[in-house]
Image (cartoon, rainbow, N blue to C red):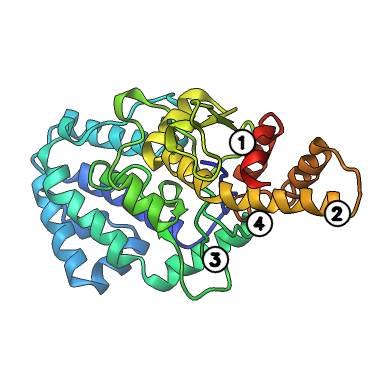
Amino acid sequence: MLRTYKPLDNHNVFLYQTHVQHLICNVWCNAVNEKNCQDLLSEDFEVIYLARDWVKTAVDEIYEICKGLSEDERAAIRKAFFINNDIESLCEGLSRPIELNTLNSIVEQKMKPLLVRFYNELINTKEKLDYYNKLIENSGHYKFCPCCGLTPIESAESHYREDNDHYLPKADYPFASVNFKNLPPLCSKCNKKCKSTKNPFENRRISFYPFVPLENEFEISIEINDLGSTNYLELKEPEVAIGFNNDVDKVDTWNWLFEINTRYNEEVRQFSKTELRILANRFRRNEERKQSMSYQEILNDAIEDYTFDKYDDRKFLKAPFLREMLNKPEWLATYI
């Protein structure tokens, strides 16, 4: 994550995870012949259970099947629920997620479809939008996706919202389907086109947790590799190298999930021509007005301009590109 969200302390959407915990750990995993499912339901969940036929039917069916679970199978389900919902510990590599195929088949065949439906239908659009707006307000009104920094996102005043990304994919980790600590809003390109169903903990990866401050603010470096035929009017992908100052292993996961290096490389190559043309005009005006500013002074002024609101309009990439140009005065021959 280029930036992270400042989490909300409370919101109604967090109640759904409380309901799911109660249902899995206190109801289904305590299923016995001597009691009906409804006998074990909390008053709050009973309201949901009685108000929707599809909830009651599915909850009762799973309860009946769970009566046949062994104590070890019940304990494994409870353990998986708590471990797979401690997203921060998983991101830091302090624990490893428990996979579906290690649990009784009822989890994948019956619990998973219901829990995914809970996210899609039980939590209504209005609640999700209200949560999104309050999260954006609480985080300082981000204008661009905090994951990539490239795509504008909906404001808190908008009637729309960005995608809630299931950081742990709900297809593989259904116990976190309605856990909003597992649901950072991301732009559609990050969520659907890049990450899709990738698992951030695959192959024992560690990852940035989207709801805690970064230990280090990102500083990005850009290097132009002169291959002998470099044309500053049209830089090529191998000529642009992107570097990051942050945790190497987490950056690697971030890059793999969201194709960050490829996207940043493309962005730099797209804006480079315009940025250099703007600089060339500054040099011309400097000479015409006899202002006697040096090459370094002109570039440093431009770099300083990009330190304000650095996450707007790709300034976090433009500033390091101009820093690299401090060492590459040969580009001027192309533009002047």
Q: Tell me the number on the disc at residue 140.
A: 4
Q: Residue 151, image x and y in percent?
A: 50, 56
Amino acid marked by disc 1: Phe
**Dot 4: what SS?**
loop
Disc nearer the start of the sequence (4/1): 4
Marks 3,1: beta carbons within 8 A = no
Q: Residue 13, image x and y in percent?
A: 44, 60
Query: Residue beneath label 1, please?
Result: 218
Disc nearer the start of the sequence (2/1): 1
Foreground of the two, 201 or 86 = 201
Q: Tell me the number on the disc at residue 288.
A: 2
Amino acid marked by disc 3: Asn
> Which residue is located at x 60 percent, y 49 percent?
6
> Which residue is located at x 80 percent, y 36 percent?
296
Q: Give the Cα distance between marks 4 and 3.
A: 11 Å
Disc nearer the start of the sequence (3/1): 3
Q: Give the Cα distance between marks 2 and 4.
A: 43 Å
Name the mark nearer the viewer: 4 or 1.
1
> Which residue is located at x 84 percent, y 49 percent?
287
Amino acid marked by disc 4: Gly
